[in-house]
Amino acid sequence: MLKSKLVFLFLLVCGGFASADPLTTVDHVDLTLYVGKWYEIASIPQYFQRKCVSDTTAEYEIIGKNRVRVYNSCETEDHRRIASEGRAKVVDTETNAKLKVTFAHIGDNYFYTFGGKYWITYLDSNYRYAIVGHPNRKYGWILSREPSLPESTLHMLITELKMRGYDACQFMMTPQKGGYSTRGSLCDLVSVDTLEQEL
């Protein structure tokens, strides 16, 4: 009995330290369809977005072979519109689903050494909404072509997040004009019990 308890405890502890499955990406992204304006519906809060309180958007534009201009903007607490411009390069040319994004630059020279991984892990077939993440799952965004998504779609995306090893409760809703007006946890939209039954 003692031996079996020790074995169980060992497995429990080891399981807690086991690495999650690798984050998967979509099979292919047509960048000509992906570029344009996206609204941030929800995200895992990040330090570099600390001044953003609402109306966060990302705009992408192809500027060369495997190169994309990135323009992020948002509304601050004192109702100012702030923005930052960066560059992205495709690092997986077979799928176009893995990019590296950087905002570090001197003049027109951008330094990808300091860039972050931008992996498109879920994409609607009509390019209407997407989940973008990082393989360590400390970063994540739900993006949409519109400032809001139906609750049924969000319900589905929460399930997709869980299937990819994300904790949906880490994602906070982004207030948008014409969308959600308050900031709250994404997982509050649906019950955990419902999600567990679906999975």
Image (cartoon, rainbow, N blue to C red):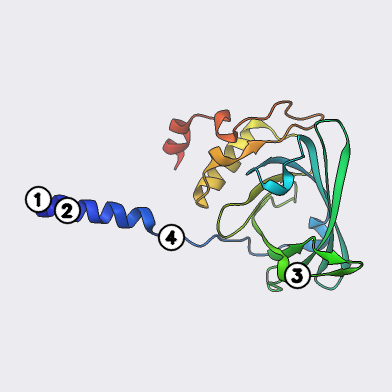
> Which residue bears the numbered disc 1?
2
Q: Looking at the image, is 133 positioned above or below residue 90?
A: above
What secondary structure is marked by label 4? loop
The tag on residue 161 is none
**Mark 1 and 2 residues: CB-CB less than 8 Å, in contact?**
yes
Q: Alpha carbon of mark 1 to alpha carbon of mark 2: how far?
A: 6 Å
- Judged left or right of residue 154, residue 39 is right
Position above or below: 4 against 53: below
Q: Position of residue 23 (x, y in %)?
A: 54, 60
Location of mark 2 (residue): 6
Q: Which SS class for mark 3?
A: helix
Q: Is residue 53 visible?
A: yes
Callout 2: SS: helix
Task: Tell me residue 171's x, y (percent).
Answer: 60, 40
Q: Position of residue 62 (x, y in %)?
A: 87, 64
Q: State the mark number for residue 112.
A: 3
At 23% from the left and 51% from the top, the residue drawn is 9
To which residue does mark 4 refer?
A: 19
From the viewer's perspective, is residue 35 above or below residue 181?
below
Sequence-first disc among 1 and 4: 1
Picture residue at 38% right of the left edge, 59% below the top: 18
